[in-house]
Amino acid sequence: MTAATGVNGRAGFRDPSPARSLALFRAFLREQSDPEACYALLARDAADQVEAYGKVAGKVVVDVGGGSGHFTREFRARGAQALLFEPDTTELGQDPPAGTVVADGYLLPLPDASADVTFSSNVLEHVADRDTFVSELVRVTRPGGLIYVAFTNWLSPWGGHEWAPWHYLGADRAQARYRRRTGRAPKHTLGENLFAHHIGATLRHVRARDDVSVVAARSRYWPFLAEAVTRVPGVREFATWNLLLILRRCPP
Ligand SMILES: C[S@@+](CC[C@H](N)C(=O)[O-])C[C@H]1O[C@@H](n2cnc3c(N)ncnc32)[C@H](O)[C@@H]1O
């Protein structure tokens, strides 16, 4: 057994730690050749991050924009009643988890306060209206429940996704370069399915809300100083890579 397989399916790394970041980075490098292993490790790691605040067994976990469902499967493997809501049937692939609902995160077909944990990994940068998306996550989370939101901010070295890091020269130039180099249209177009969200503005938004408290704001992948890096205005926009917010729903 390696640290990456962990016990009982957990990734089992100390977080943050160099060993964890290295394992995630290695998995990311193998994303094309071995996507299953890459996403399984990412899912175990994210579920570990959620379970740092309490076990999910027996809890309702709502995975918003969960793609093909690797996080939903991991939460179910841990005993949660996990539900996948994904608007794009192409992203769902051939074998989505049973009970998957095709739905947009702006308007979830769920009653208020129905989830113990609302989970959204790398979706926020794909929605134009950040605040409405967050509001919907908050609406469906019960008071005392947890909201996990992680996203790649625009000025992250990975902010331009497949055309990164050339987005630093401007999205139009970066997208044109991608087309020239690959002969293909990029998957993401700024303003259509990728949006320039910033860490400072997002933190100000969630801190100003009276319906959530911010439990953690940190870099999702950094091996050390994961919280410290998000405290330095300016620097955080470039150095955080991916912002992880853990929010707790306040009582009404
Ligand atoms: C980069 S993928 C992330 C998939 C998965 N959550 C993960 O972390 O591997 C972005 C996902 O966000 C979804 N998405 C985009 N706009 C959305 C919206 N308005 N509501 C919910 N999901 C959305 C996309 O369909 C896609 O599955």
Image (spheres, rainbow, N blue to C red):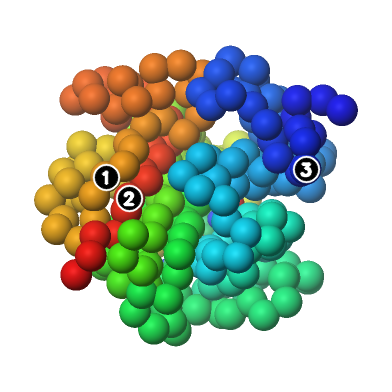
Q: Residue 214 got which mark?
A: 1
From the image, tell me which residue sits under label 2: 247
Tell me where residue 163 appears, x and y as whole percent.
Answer: 50, 39
From the image, tell me which residue sits under label 3: 8
Mark 2 or 3, closer to the camera:
3
Name the residue: 67% across, 43% down: 44
Q: Residue 203 got which mark?
A: none
Three-letter code, disc 3: Asn
Three-letter code, disc 2: Leu
Q: Is residue 216 above or below residue 77?
A: above
Answer with left or right where residue 34 lies relative to residue 85.
right
Q: Is residue 39 above or below residue 218?
A: below
Q: Is residue 217 above or below residue 86?
A: above
- In terms of image quadrants, where is residue 3? top right
Name the residue: 20% across, 37% down: 200
Q: Which SS class for mark 1? A: strand
User: Could you tell me if the residues under marks 1 and 2 are in contact, i.e. CB atoms within 8 Å?
Assistant: yes
Answer with mark 3 or mark 1, whichever residue precedes in sequence.
3
Q: Is residue 24 visible?
A: yes
Tell me where residue 136 appears, x and y as whole percent.
Answer: 32, 70
Q: Residue furthest right?
A: 1
Tell me where residue 103 appears, x and y as whole percent.
Answer: 50, 79
Answer with mark 2 or mark 3, whichever residue precedes in sequence.
3
Judging depth in this view, the residue of 178 and 165 nearest the camera is 165
Q: Is residue 127 visible?
A: no
Name the residue: 47% across, 56% down: 120
Three-letter code, disc 1: Val
How crowded pointer 3 is (Cα within 10 Å; few <14, some 14-19, many 20+) is rated as few
How crowded pointer 1 is (Cα within 10 Å; few <14, some 14-19, many 20+) is rated as some
Tell me where residue 248 appears, x and y as whole percent.
Answer: 32, 53
